Image (cartoon, rainbow, N blue to C red):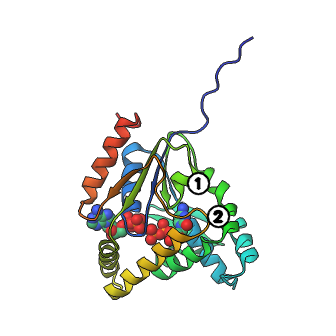
Amino acid sequence: MQEKPEAPLTGPIITVDGPSGAGKGTLCQMLAAKLNWALLDSGALYRVTALAAKQHGVALDNEAGLEAIAAHLDVQFKVSNEQSGVQVILEGENVTSNLRTEETGAIASQVAAVNAVRAALLERQRAFQQKPGLIADGRDMGTVVFPAAELKVYLTASAEERGQRRHKQLLESGNNASLAGIIEDIRARDDRDMNRAVAPLRPADEAIVIDSTNMSIEAVFDQVQQAAKRAGLLA
Ligand SMILES: Nc1ncnc2c1ncn2[C@@H]1O[C@H](COP(=O)(O)OP(=O)(O)O)[C@@H](O)[C@H]1O
Ligand SMILES: Nc1ccn([C@@H]2O[C@H](COP(=O)(O)OP(=O)(O)O)[C@@H](O)[C@H]2O)c(=O)n1
């Protein structure tokens, strides 16, 4: 008797990689809403690992300690109706307000350079693949975590433009910081993310590369929607 071909257990994937402030999070939320697909914010996992290491007093050069932290992360991502966005609960504590700070981002990029940390988080990220589809936001989504993704986007912008966006974002949330300092931090993080030995930030071979320096959010979204249509992911 011939076996019936099995229906795929998991849905298609769109990966969005690129440097800090390029607009990945914004684009991914728009795509997830448009397609009604799930969203993986892989940067949040590295940020949570950074916060957990800090909380447990694990030094950034203690690779075995960082690996253990990443392997045993007790984290929940809760969608709340009262508060906007996703609430992140680490070991029972709400860490949402600490998660997106530039300081946490800087520690996250140091933690993310440790091979054992990346290996410990790999399966956790792959487990997000689901039906009807997944939008994956990060640095190595198209190159390492989901190499067979149906559509790969690499979103970038000049460091000055990305710094200005972050600066504006910080001012809007009531935080003050010098623009020059933010651009310097962005360059330092770019350098670390692009030049690390393991899973460096780079466009996947098949990725469509979008430079959003002089593009509106809507224009970026439009270009990616066109690519999704060409790939048969969107009617
Ligand atoms: N094309 C764009 N033009 C102007 N501002 C943008 C653009 N894309 C994103 N932004 C703004 O820049 C900031 C950083 O965007 P975000 O999506 O968080 O970037 P990333 O996830 O790549 O770090 C946000 O305030 C967002 O509204
Ligand atoms: N897939 C990923 C996602 C994030 N990261 C690391 O985690 C840091 C924080 O990522 P993020 O996506 O939250 O940062 P932003 O782009 O939002 O500033 C990055 O600077 C990377 O070092 C990574 O190495 N691989």
Q: Mark 1 points at which residue?
A: 144
Q: Please give the name of the residue rendered at 33% of the width and 88% of the height, measured from the top-left corner.
A: 178
Which is in the foreground here, disc 2 or disc 1? 1
Frontmost residue, 80 versus 4: 4
> Marks 2 and 1, Cα distance to the nearest angstrom?
10 Å
Amino acid type, residue under disc 2 in the picture: Arg
Q: Please give the name of the residue rendered at 37% of the width and 65% of the height, measured from the top-left corner.
A: 22
Q: Where is residue 161 in the image (x, y as percent from the top left)?
A: 29, 72
Quadrant location, the N terminus:
top right
Whether residue 73 is visible to the viewer of this picture, yes or no, is: no
How packed mark 2 is, by other alpha carbons closer than 10 Å (few <14, some 14-19, many 20 or more), is some
Asked whether mark 2 and ligand 2 are closer than 8 Å, the reply comes as yes
Q: Where is residue 192 in the image (x, y as percent from the top left)?
A: 52, 74
Quadrant location, the C terminus:
top left
> In terms of secondary structure, where does tag 2 sit?
helix
Disc 2 and disc 1 in contact, CB within 8 angstroms:
yes
Q: Where is residue 56 in the image (x, y as percent from the top left)?
A: 70, 82
- Compared to residue 25, the image places residue 182 above or below, namely below
Q: Which mark is residue 118?
A: 2
Q: Residue lying at the far top in this picture: please name it.
A: 1
* In this picture, residue 101 sits left or right of residue 59: left
Amino acid type, residue under disc 1 in the picture: Val
Q: Residue 148's quadrant in the figure?
A: top right
Frontmost residue, 109 versus 135: 109
* In this picture, residue 52 sits left or right of residue 194: right
Q: Which of marks 2 and 1 is nearer the N terminus?
A: 2
* In this picture, residue 196 sits left or right of residue 38: right
Q: Please give the name of the residue rendered at 55% of the width and 72% of the height, measured from the top-left corner.
A: 47
- Compared to residue 197, the image places residue 208 above or below, namely above
Number of numbered discs visible in the structure rendering:
2
Whether residue 189 is visible to the viewer of this picture, yes or no, is: yes
> In terms of secondary structure, where does tag 1 sit?
helix
